[in-house]
Every structure is written in structure tokens, then in C-alpha cells.
Amino acid sequence: MNRIKLVIAAFILLAVGAYVAFDLGQYLTLEFIQSRLASLQAFRDENFAVTAAIYFFFYVAATGISIPGAILLTLLGGAIFGLWWGTLLVSFASSIGATGAFLASRLLLRDWVQRRFGAYLAPINKGIAKDGAFYLFSLRMVPLVPFFVVNLLMGLTSISVPAYYIASQIGMFVSTLVYVNAGAELAQITSLSGLVSPSVLLSFTLLGVVPLAAKGVIGVMQKRKRLSLFKKPKRFDANVVVVGGGSAGLVTSLIVAGAKARVVLVEKHRMGGDCLYTGCVPSKSIIRSGRIMEYIRRAEDYGIVDATGKVDFAAVMRRVQTVIETIEPHDSPERFTSLGVECVSGAARLLSPYEVEVEGKRITTESIVIASGARPFIPLVPGLDGIDYLTSDNVWSLTELPPRLLVVGGGPIGCELAQAFSRLGSKVTQVDMAERIMPREDADVSAAVSARFEAQGIEVLTSHRLQKFETVDGEHFMQAEHQGETVRVAFDRVLLAIGRKANTEGFGLEEIGVALTPQGTVEVNEYLQTSLPNVFACGDVAGPYQFTHMASYQAWFAALNAIAGGIWRSRVNYSVVPWATFTDPEVARVGLSEDEAKQRGIAYELTRYEMNHHDRSLADGEAHGFVKILTVPGKDKILGVTIVGYHAGEQIAEFVFAMTHNMGLKSISAVTHIYPTLGEANKFAANAWRSARLPTQYFPWLKRFFDWRRG
């Protein structure tokens, strides 16, 4: 076997060497072929069989040793032999030559590659064993990768030789027909007028259209292949079944019902989801109580003396629950039923892309929308399982204020709750492994928030890597490593806020073959379709943004695409995504930050407006923060905006509107804003951009003109 390998390798090297040494590539150019086309056609007329045999052999040899130029040889086949004979010769020659290259790659390289990289290639080999012929057929139909590269790479896999040849023969036929036809038409051109003849124009149109059409055909075939594993019911109980009654699921259901389609919403716990019960609503409620307490402490700054207040933490938490109960009817089954949504209580399980089981009852449906949300991520830290830890899910059950609260996590949730509990009276220590809190924002943003935290008594420990938790003599300790040293922090309760994990387990996603991303979310395309074309996902379970407003935004597209039945699709657009962290100061952003622009190599100009001289902020005693705008160099087009300050989440709305509708800073500058309002700072920031670009070189001439006007 080694001798055979050496012979084959030597033959290939000699052939390639001769190709390079004798500059045989000069004969595979369009100019050379056109110059010899008449003589080749004359030789064909006298010796058709010989010409066909020579052409066939040369085509097989060229593709077998992977010499570039297959497209040119195909055009030549059409020019010499015409459409039908050319197609017949090229179709078999290309498949035989490709199989030869495939076998050479397999014989010479596969064993070595598999020995060295077998562990990495195991998933690929598994996929090839299952669907290798279909993958190859797709590559042949839509040549995203050059054919000679496909030949060599497929030789390293486990696909069988017959499957490889058949998939190549069938898959390359359409493109072979198109290129041979183009070659046949080119052979008929005798003057410049021939370049615009209908037949030539049609041939070149086919060169562009056929790959697109083939791509569409492949897409349909892929969908049918995935769904062919499941039995499709003859009739459906619903048009759409929505799994999950949080923000994404509720909005999806309303849109489907509004289109007069039948929708079933399945929720196993309480409609309203995390946002209502454990997220946005309760967190903003406790933040408000903390802010009121902070104002009491600052009352003297406003001329109010002897102001005192005492925190009744149980009353604070009762208020949180009251706010939830006030909003709760808005998301209730009764309201949604009145709006045309069939609400089903229970745990859903997907039996197929067409069938969902809830508490033993099976519901057949045309489409499914997964909106199962996410839950707090729990790290694997030694000793944590022995501590009654808190998360954003269960912190709302507290009735006593923790004297010492350890907050693990420097993201939005950790920062918001750390400050709220600190203002209510807890001694708060915040720890994170990142170099700074709020690491998704620019460094100056993190510094502004961190400075306020430290001024209010929060101990911020960054670049601290958790090592373990332990309890000694009834007292809890956290141990972390910081710059090579061990740090221990005593605490009474610990709140974990280090991210959220998508809810994908336990209801049949893996069993029916819905693919997940490496991050653990459901994998979706730009239409929010999963790997099964009639199953969609939106909200936290899909990502990439885990915000309530983005869940609602995605729900619109998921609902429309689910009820359209493949007739019409709408692509989700993430070009303008706003968010806010409701600390004090608030942080709001839309579009690019400075850090992101630098990382992506995007050129920008920076405009910054400081809020410390803004009239309304001064009147409110909140004159701190800034507006930072990134624009395209030399233009007013907005790339991103970051606002740090009092009510930044409200203030940024104008920039979100402008970016959504492709308006620039000139448009904001032209708007009349009420005085004195925080929104007026947006106009001042836009004016700062304009002022920096005034044509100051002409000012001396203007002065002379007005001096002349005065006489």
C-alpha cells in the first residue's frame, strides 16, 4: 500500500510540476482558446470520436490532479461540441475526474489526518455518515467552495465512493448544463453585435440566476428533509402554539390572535414571566424605595432640615408585591382569553414540530414559537451548595434586610440590586472577576458608576476570582483570589447575579432536534426560525439580547413568520438596540460604544456634552453625567450614543427614534425642546457637534463684512 501511495504521489507531483514548468496554464486561457477555436472545430468535424476522446481524457486528468480551469474547460466543451454532446462529455468527465481527486486525497491523506485530528473530526464524521451525500449535493448545486477544494476535503471524510460519485454526477449537472450552454453560445459570436443577441444574453443570465435558484431549491429540500422525520397531521388544532407566557410569548400570542389565527399559549407557572414577577417590575420598585431613602439623606441639600426616615424593609417588600399585583391583571389569562388567545396552564412538551403535549392533552399545530425565557445562572463554586443563596428569582421573598450583603456579579442586575440594598441600609460588598463593573460599557461609564457606588459606601471588588464559600462558627465567608493574594469577605446573605441561562431543557427540544448555540440558547436565523423550519424562538431563550423590550420586538417577527407559512418572511433587524441600567446614575446606550468601535476598526468622531452645567439638572440637584455620541467621520450619521445621568433611560429615546428612522444630529438640532427639560441636553449635544464644524476660517471675512455694513 505504501508503494502505491508513493507511485500516486509521484505521478501527481510530476503532473503538477510539468504543468508549472512548461507553463501549460497559458493554454487554459480564454484568449488562447478563442484564437484556436476555428481549427479545433475543423478538427472535430473531421475526427469527432478522436476529438471527443482527447477532450474527455484531458478533462478527467485535469480535474483528477486538481488543476484549476474546470470552468474554462467546460466552456470549451460547449464551444467545440455544442450543448448536448458537450453536456454529456463534461458531465461524466467532471464526475470521474472529481472522484479520482477524491480517491487520491483519501489514499494519501485521510489516515494521517484522522490519526492526528480524529477527536476534532468526530462530530464531522458523524454528520457525514448521516447526511454526507446531501451536504455534497448542496455544495455541487451551489458552489460556495471551488469544486477542486471540495474533492480534496471530502476525501478526508468517511463518505462512500458510490455516494460521492452519484451526488457529484447529479449535483453538478445543472451548473454543467448552464456553462456548456454559455460556451456553445460564445462559439457563435462572429461580431460585436453577437454580444447582445438574445441567446447570448440568456446564457449569461442563466449563469447568474441558476445558482440563486439552486440555492432556493436546496433550502426547500433541507426543510423537507428535516421535517420528513415527523408525521404531518392532516388537520391542525391551532395555527400557532406558543410555549411560555413571559414578555415574548404574550406579545407573540396577541399578534397571532390579532391576525385572526388560532393561537394556544402554554404557561406552566404564571403568565407575565420574569419581567413581572422577578425582573423589571420588582427591581424598579425596590430601586425607587432606595432612591427615596437617598433623597431623605440628601434633604439638607435641598434646604430641608431635620428630615429623617427609617426603612421598614418588610413594608418595602410588601410595596413591591403590591406593584406586581396591580400590573398582574394586564397579563392575566382572563384578559388574553378576551383578546382571542386560548390560554392553557401546564408544562408543555414538544412531541414533534407539529404536536405539543400539555398535561396529557395533545395539540396539533402548523407552527410553534418557543418563548420559554431564562433563569439565573448558578456557578459551580465549592461550598455554594451549603449556603442559602439568593438570586434575582428568590430575593423578593426576603422580609428582613440583610445586614451584610455580598453581591456576586458586576453586570446590570448586580449593580442595580447592590445600590438598592445599600440605600436601604445593607452593608454591600460587590465582587466580580472582570476588571471593572459594567464591563460591556466604556471605561468612563464604569468609572462614573463605580465612583458613585464607593461614595455611597458600597465596597467594589473587581478582578476577584471566586475560589470557594465556607461557613465557620455560623458565619459565612467568600474566598477569592486577587492579584495572587487570597481575599476573604464575611457576609450574611449572598446574591448571585452573574448572568442568565436559557430555559431549553425538559420540554423536548433536543428530542425533536432543535439545535442550540454554544452559549446554550436556541439557534435561530434572521427570521427567528430554529433548525426546524416551522419552529421559531424569541426572547431570552433565543438571545442575543436578554431585554424585555427586545423580547417584545422579536415576538413581532416570530409571530408574523409563524403565521405566514413560508409564503412571506420578515427579517429581524438588530441595527438599533437600546438598553439601560437603572443605577444612579442611570446608564443608557444605543448602537456602538467607543470600545466596540475600536475593536471592530470602525472610524468615528466623538461629541461629548457634560451635564454638570445643564440647567434642569442643576435645578434638580442631579448635575452629573454626560451625553456621548459617535458619528460617521465628516457626517452627522449617528453610530452610537451613551448617556450617563439622571433619567438617562428616558433621555435616550430621542436618539433611538432618530437612528431607527435614519435621522442625524442635524435633525435633532433642528427640533425645539421645552426648557428646562432633560431632553434639552440632546439638542445641546447635537449643537456641540455642529459648533465643532463651523467654518471658522471665514469668520474674519464675516467680521469685515458686518463692519462695512455699519459704515
Image: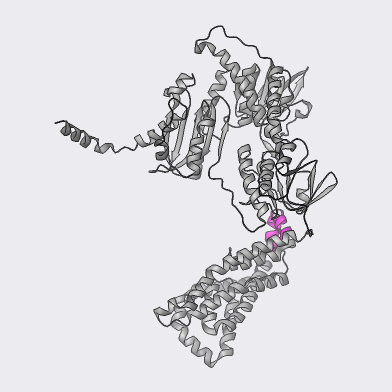
> Which residue is at 62% across, 70% downward?
9
Q: Position of residue 274 (x, y in %)?
A: 70, 34
Q: Main secondary structure of the magenta part?
A: helix
Comparing 426 with 221, the one in front is 221
Residue lying furthest front in this view?
338
Q: Position of residue 442 (x, y in %)?
A: 51, 34
Answer above or below: position of 198 versus 227: below
| Residue 121 magenta-highlighted | yes
Q: Position of residue 209 (x, y in %)?
A: 55, 68
> Which residue is at 52% across, 25% downward?
646
> Which residue is at 70% across, 64% downward?
132
The magenta region covers: 109-128
Looking at the image, residue 546 sits to the left or right of residue 577; the answer is: right
| Residue 90 magenta-highlighted | no
Comparing 207 with 94, the one in front is 207
Position of the N terminus by quadrant: bottom right
Q: Position of residue 102 (x, y in %)?
A: 65, 69
Looking at the image, residue 190 sits to the left or right of residue 492; the answer is: left
Comparing 615 with 145, the one in front is 615
Looking at the image, residue 156 sits to the left or right of residue 655; the answer is: right
Q: Quadrant of residue 2?
A: bottom right
Q: Quadrant of residue 135?
A: bottom right
Q: Is residue 547 visible?
A: no
Residue lying furthest top in this view?
306
